Amino acid sequence: MFFCGCAQPPEKDRPYISKTRGPAAVERPGYITHKVRHGETVWAISQRYNLSPQTVIQINGIKDVRNIKVGQELLIPRTASLPHASPASVSGAVASAPVSAKGFVWPLNGRILQRYDDIVNGHKNTGIDIETQLGQDVFASKGGVVEVVTENPDGWGKVVVIRHSGGIHTWYAHNSKVFVRKGNWVRRGQRIAQAGRSGSVTRPELHFKVFRNDKPVNPLSYLPRR
């Protein structure tokens, strides 16, 4: 499947109230400050700290996400994952999972059954197939917005697609149960589904893809080595 990616949400999805500048951040217990750098957006900053854009907007009283200024200080909860933080700072059920240099975690633990570019049923594999236990939790590999939740497209069973910054999408197929809906913001490591054998497979497995600018790329180049 081919999906359109973008570095930040579509214009219609971006909060807009007025063209007044949000208030400057004031030091408060439980928060750190982030100074906006040239080219940064609310979307990019929220992804940097593994937060939803709404969280950054609400905490800082931002009225127009298109009008944040270079040098403006934004409050960030200390509980957020800091840039390049150690794996222990990632909250949730995958708190001990390593994070790659590109900010991804494995969607679940399991043996790789088929690799990218392997020939499977006469076709080149455009993702990786990971062995699972039925009902095993599946986690968002990186924070983003759920773009697609669907069932049984071309034999893939229950599928979740997440859009990330930088034109990246991740794709999770053959799930038995899905816990998110289209439009939900999810954090890296958040449970999004349970693994299964929906669709055309005969054993529990997760088919995991990474798309960059709508083209499939090797997921292993994004995931941490193990």
Image (tube, helix red, strand yellow):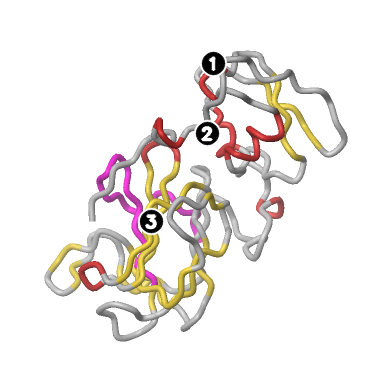
Sequence-wise first label, 1 or 2: 1
Seen from the viewer's position, the closer of residues 155 and 184 is 184
Mark 1–mark 2 Cα distance, whole angstroms, equals 14 Å
Seen from the viewer's position, the closer of residues 28 and 88 is 28
Q: Residues within 10 Å of mark 2 (few under 14, many from 20)?
A: many
- Judging from the image, what secondary structure is the residue with disc 1 in? loop
State which quarter of the image contains the N terminus: bottom left
Percent x, y of residue 110? 47, 73
Sequence-wise first label, 1 or 3: 1
The residue under label 1 is 38
Residue lying farthest to the right in this orientation: 29
Taking the spot 74% from the left edge, 18% from the top edge, the residue there is 24
Quarter holding residue 119:
bottom left
Label ID, residue 55: none
Label ID, residue 161: 3
Span of residues in magenta: 206-226
Taking the spot 70% from the left edge, 28% from the top edge, the residue there is 60
- Judging from the image, what secondary structure is the residue with disc 2 in? helix
Quarter holding residue 69:
top right
The residue under label 2 is 43
Q: Amino acid at mark 1?
A: His
Percent x, y of residue 211? 32, 48
Select label 1 or label 3 by which is in front.
3
Residue 84 magenta-highlighted: no
